[in-house]
Image (cartoon, rainbow, N blue to C red):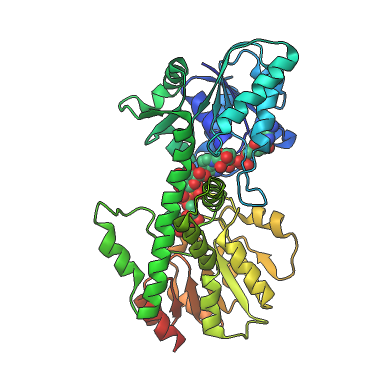
Amino acid sequence: MKVAIFGTGYVGLVTGTCLAEIGHDVTCVDVDTAKIDGLKRGVLPIYEPGLEPLVVNNHRAGRLHFTTDAATAISGNEIIFIAVGTPPDEDGSADLKYVVEVARTIGRHLQTPAIVVNKSTVPVGTAGLVNDAIARELEARGASIDFEVVSNPEFLKEGAAVEDCMHPDRIVIGARDEKAVESLKKLYGPFVRNHDRFVVMDVASAELTKYAANAMLATKISFMNEIANIAERVGADVEMVRQGIGSDPRIGWQFIYPGAGYGGSCFPKDVQALTRTAQQHGYQPQLLNAVEEVNERQKSHLFELIKRHYGDSLAGKTFAVWGLAFKPNTDDMRAASSRRLMEHLWDAGAKVKAFDPEAAKEARRIYGNRKDLQVCDAMDDALEGADALVVVTEWRQFRSPDLKALKAALGDAVVFDGRNLYSPKDMEDAGLAYYGIGRGRSIAAAAS
Ligand SMILES: NC(=O)C1=CN([C@@H]2O[C@H](COP(=O)(O)OP(=O)(O)OC[C@H]3O[C@@H](n4cnc5c(N)ncnc54)[C@H](O)[C@@H]3O)[C@@H](O)[C@H]2O)C=CC1
Ligand SMILES: O=C(O)[C@H]1O[C@H](OP(=O)(O)OP(=O)(O)OC[C@H]2O[C@@H](n3ccc(=O)[nH]c3=O)[C@H](O)[C@@H]2O)[C@H](O)[C@@H](O)[C@@H]1O
């Protein structure tokens, strides 16, 4: 099938590439000329495991095209995806200006009937806005061309995006028109050959499903962070508690890892946007408010633990920070907890030596040449001359450090573990003071 995708970010590029991989003819469109030029040369704008060879091979095979020319991209394509950003507006609601702009562009250039599939995360009612924007442009041209707007939210995770796209656990389609549903089933069919994973519903329910999924996952995380904060106060270890509840299939093992708070481009903005939607409809979403509030507090929690150890005398101290990306296997630092931590440390007069396997370039882009930040090329380099280590992202290579070397390297022999990667006992045996998240007993011991 012939497909155009507007927006060549995490969602658009991954979706387009995976659709090309299963044999469709895909044109990715973006307004960012540098991104498109890079992609044509095989230079990817993001780090995503497994994506680069797929992009290069499918581009070479002539199934995956990149352009900034919307008119050419739209021409003759039966399916047109919208996969542009929906960042938070000033009041937290989703800013739909990019989505509406794409809809207008489609209306301006559409020549043949098409299904317009909205993959961006958008509030209920957006399909209607998209429909109206296209219709208005067609009317202005005096053109009468059939089109149908469908909601098809995306559930992929960064760091596992290709895998999620190739093996989706469900494909949600919100549509009024049976023919549009059949076309999308044909498009995605090869991804779900052995299982019927299509969940077909009305458009409003599909739009809300996306927010419900992200809000539920964010709720699980904030819930565990709340338990961690209680554990810290009552002298329990949240890691034991996690193991004690995860085996109950009604609770499950996933998304119950306490930590330095959830980050990324989606959970924070989507919880806020759903909150705004509820409020706009006269409902006070107390649970969603609490999920966000707990997360906001949690993002400062590592710094609170650092203050607990050092008191207010942080000026002149140097902190090694392992992990800058908001999660492992990505270079994305949007709303990353590392940023909040470093900003607190800098405000307190401390310096940071940071290492991340993929996000170094992004950190340099965000923070430029700050005197109090040194972005290092190796994890051990970050330890040199540091007083303490703070682990913010659970990259695999951080999991088994040489504790003797760690003790020797750190001026104050103290570790703050924002992802509970280490055993308090191993740390204690190695002579390191250890602060994890929600690890009440070891924190009490370290602070005493
Ligand atoms: N990042 C993720 O893991 C996921 C994101 N989503 C949702 O998908 C949407 C896209 O997110 P990302 O891919 O992360 O965004 P992104 O920011 O990585 O990429 C968006 C792209 O759209 C381009 N763009 C903006 N206006 C355009 C226009 N008029 N025509 C063509 N291209 C245009 C931008 O230049 C940018 O390259 C958002 O609504 C997000 O909430 C959904 C699931 C997962
Ligand atoms: O809408 C989106 O953009 C996507 O948002 C999340 O995906 P993503 O943000 O890429 O990454 P996650 O693995 O969900 O992690 C989000 C944050 O939660 C944190 N987290 C995750 C799991 C956990 O147990 N504890 C925890 O603190 C991570 O460290 C990270 O900061 C969802 O998992 C995807 O299904 C969704 O499509």
The residue lying at 66 percent from left, 25 percent from top is 133
Asked whether, in this view, residue 251 is left or right of residue 26, the answer is: left
Residue furthest to the left: 248
Picture quarter with the C terminus:
bottom left
Q: Which residue occupies 40% across, 61% down?
A: 223
Q: Residue 128 in the image: x percent, y percent?
A: 58, 28
Above or below — where is 121 with respect to 183?
Answer: below
Task: Please tell me which residue is depicted at 63% across the width and 45% down the height of the picture.
Answer: 87
| Quarter-of-image position of residue 247 | bottom left
* Location of residue 422 in the rendering, given as x and y in whole percent from the top left corner: 40, 69
Looking at the image, residue 224 lies above or below residue 310: above
Q: Position of residue 1 (x, y in %)?
A: 51, 16
Q: Can you say whether 239 is above or below 157 in the image?
A: below
Q: Seen in the image, is 193 located left or right of residue 274? A: left
166 w.r.t. 387: above or below: above
Quarter of the image for residue 116 reads top right
Whether residue 30 is visible here, answered yes or no, is no
At which x and y percent is residue 231? 36, 74
